[in-house]
Amino acid sequence: MKALTTGKEGVDAGAVRLRREIHALPETAFEEIETAGLVAARMIARGLKVRTGVGKTGVAALFDSGRPGKTVLLRADLDALPLMERTGLPFAATNGKMHACGHDGHVAALDAAADLLLLDPPARGRVVFAFQPGEEGAGGAKAMIADGVLDDPRPDVVFGVHLWTALPLGHVGVARGAMMAAVDEFLIEVTSPGGHAASPHETRDTIVAAAHVVTALQTIVSRRLSPLLPTVVSVTSVHGGSAFNILPESVTLRGTCRSFDVEVADRLPSLVSEIAERAAQTLGCAAKMSYRRISPTVVNHPAEAERALRAAQALAPIPAPGSVTADIRTMGGEDFSEFLLRVPGAFAFVGAARSGPPRGPHHAPDFDFDERALPHAARLLAGFARDVLAD
Ligand SMILES: [Zn+2]
Ligand SMILES: [Zn+2]
């Protein structure tokens, strides 16, 4: 791929430098003050009209050709995770937070896409560069939308990418339809009066009841839902007890449900509460559930999925044979779905697997991606925008 040059530093080298700068200073949901400030300053320096504080810490920059045409919104996410980094990289973070999902790369790629577009500014229409806070379960997309990122100008099309280390470098994955799962969170409290560990018959045991609830919840997917509709129920945290000789009054379970189908998503809260309550009752305990829908299924719109595939095919040296996939799916979630619920658009994965010794997956403390994917992501974003504006 030919490197592009603007000023002293090429776009591609600039993207790597910016990624490392952001990686070294990770900020979690709605605290992305430095990152947002950095991005806003770069967008202002390009002469774009910049709004800050969109959805608390989001940034929206507008390129307006001044001539009528479509408006396309390109989105990147700003937030890191609350995780101690163990990558050993020279630019590793040391503040107990970590860009362990690749969002540092998304910011750098969208920043570079602005350069790529402004090197040869589109003659018609508008481009909104949206830098979103709080993607990791914090509702940042909704916050930006509530703050008007989809108003004035109203985008005709939205597009976003995720660097994806499960996909080889040089590959792009898109789905014609559902691509990432709906994400929900549940909390279950199993309770009893508690008592002496030596006399379990005189009380009811919340630990044993909670263990039954954990096991019974697995029958939602295996026995209650169609095997043709992908669904996951995972219990991810179990808390209860304070001593070896006390049967605790309460055990708290926490977990997540993932689904693609809208009807399945609607049934999951009642299935989780029904099974938890009945399993606990069988053992004389009570169970109470609270349930939170975090983000809906990421569903690409057909025409925009084709645009994304077209933009991917146009990347050089991509496509190598088979490097553009049209049917990628994952049970992971993304709140870009909130944009796709309101405006036609698409989401794409950009292959970013590192060569060399294996690394942990997204959200692992040793996660890293291949920075050679940054020019691919930047060109895909810019290429998609040009495709829309050429209409
Ligand atoms: Zn993530
Ligand atoms: Zn992510």
Image (tube, helix red, strand yellow):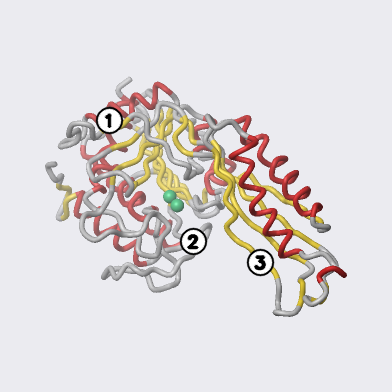
- Nearest to the observer: residue 105 or residue 189: 189
Answer yes or no: is residue 350 visible.
yes
- Residue 21 position (above or below residue 195): above
> What SS does tag 2 mark?
loop
At a point 30% along the width and 32% down the height, the residue shown is: 325
Q: Quadrant of residue 243?
A: bottom right
Q: Which residue position holds label 2?
A: 28
Image coordinates for residue 59, horizontal then vertical, percent: 45, 49
Query: How many residues crowd around disc 2 within 10 Å: few (fewer than 14), some, or many (20 or more)?
Result: many
Placement of 86 over or under 164, stated as above or below: below
Identify the mark nearer the N-term, 2 or 3: 2
Query: Looking at mark 3, is its residue's CB closer than 8 Å to ligand 1?
Result: no
Instruction: State the residue in front, 151 or 144.
Output: 144
User: How far across and down, in percent of the image, does residue 76 sit?
Assistant: 40, 46
Name the N-terminal-most of marks 2 and 1.
2
Q: Position of residue 66 (x, y in %)?
A: 35, 29
In-front residue for pair 69/327: 327
Instruction: Tell me the kind of residue under disc 2.
Output: Thr
**Label 2 within 8 A of ligand 1 by Cβ:** no
Q: Which residue is mark 3?
A: 239
View extreme (right): residue: 202
Query: Which residue occupies 74% across, 59% down?
Result: 209
Quarter of the picture holding the C terminus: top left
Give the image location of residue 153, x and y in percent: 47, 32
Q: Which residue is mark 1?
A: 311
